[in-house]
Amino acid sequence: MSILKYTPSGKLSNFIKEIYKSNFINEDRIPVLDDCCHDLVIFREANAKFFSKEFEQGTLIRYSIFSLFKVTPPFAVEPAESLSFLTIKFQPWCNNLLFSKFKKTGVFDLSEEFAALLRTEEVDSLFELENPFVEMENRLLTYLKDVCLNEKQILIKAIIEKIYKEKGQLKVSELETHFGRSRQYLNRLFREEVHYTIKHFIGMVRVVNAVKIQVNQPNISMTSLAYEVGYFDQAHFVKDFHKVAGMSPKNFFNLNGAFFRRHKTV
């Protein structure tokens, strides 16, 4: 297994959080977390199974260019003999801007919607490149050159950046005070633009931060980890983790979330 990550800068960072290339050979089922960012996934071998609460027996992904929407954790991907894919992770404030057509739950073929970015017949050649990130950066800059954030999306961007800065260790009431907007307004706007509630998003950020810490400190105790991400008791941490991941942190870490190994820094 190998994962290479690219984090864009400049104008592109307004739309793209990260791009990563993954290669799996003879891997078992791999747990995945929903980080509230809509992903555009490019499969070289369209033969992996996706599992969620809606697809407990697994659904075969036959698309080369696709995304997932409103599926319920726990999530997992089960490769066949091998699986190579490129994931373009859009910033969460772009969820409705670029994926407004999503209404139902499931796996969606986006080869037509994103044909201007990448055609299905170009997928193989993309994976032949030694560094596909340069190619994707150029394509994305062209694809997004006329796309702009509106006033509401700029506000959502500021809210999300505040949540990221605090690593999810804040309350909605603090956002009310900081941005001078009512809880009702912020929640309504957040659901429209991000497709999630603010409370769920905050919980997700804390859980993802916990996973990043555990990736770099695999021997950390659950009590210490809970305290590290702002919880005063382990039980509350386990409960919130289960809400986001669909399983306890202990079970998730025992499965060794391969997608999060890209956050390993030590």
Image: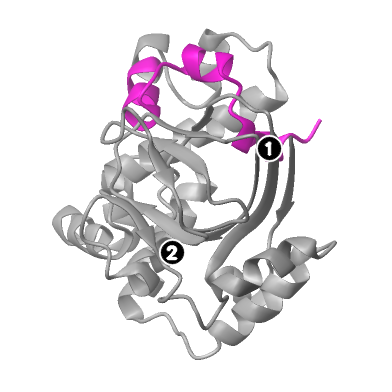
Q: Residue at x 37, y 36 (%)?
A: 203
202 relative to 37, above or below: above
- Residue 265 in magenta? yes
Q: Is 3 left or right of 49, judged from the image as shown?
A: right
Residue 249 location in percent, x, y? 47, 18
Name the magenta segment's main secondary structure: helix
SS state under label 2: helix
Identify the image quadrant of residue 191: bottom left
Q: Position of residue 175 (x, y in %)?
A: 32, 52
Q: Position of residue 94 (x, y in %)?
A: 41, 68
Label 1 neighbour load within 10 Å: few <14, some 14-19, many 20+:
some
Q: Amino acid at mark 2?
A: Ala
Res 38 visible: no
Give the residue type that dot 1 points to. Answer: Phe
Residue occupying the point 56% across, 22% down: 228
Q: Which mark is residue 24?
A: 1
Q: Is residue 100 left or right of residue 109?
A: left
| Sequence-wise first label, 2 or 1 | 1
User: What segment carries the magenta color?
Assistant: 238-266
- Residue 158's disc is 2
Which residue reaches farthest bottom?
A: 146
Viewport quadrant of the N terminus: top right
Which mark's residue is nearer the viewer, 2 or 1?
1
Residue 210 seen in this snapshot: yes
Name the residue: 32% across, 59% down: 194
Coloring applied to the structure: one colour
Q: Does dot 1 land on a helix, a strand or a loop?
A: strand
Quadrant of the rendered image containing residue 30: top right
In the image, residue 113 above or below residue 252: below
**Alpha carbon separation for disc pair 2 and 1:** 36 Å
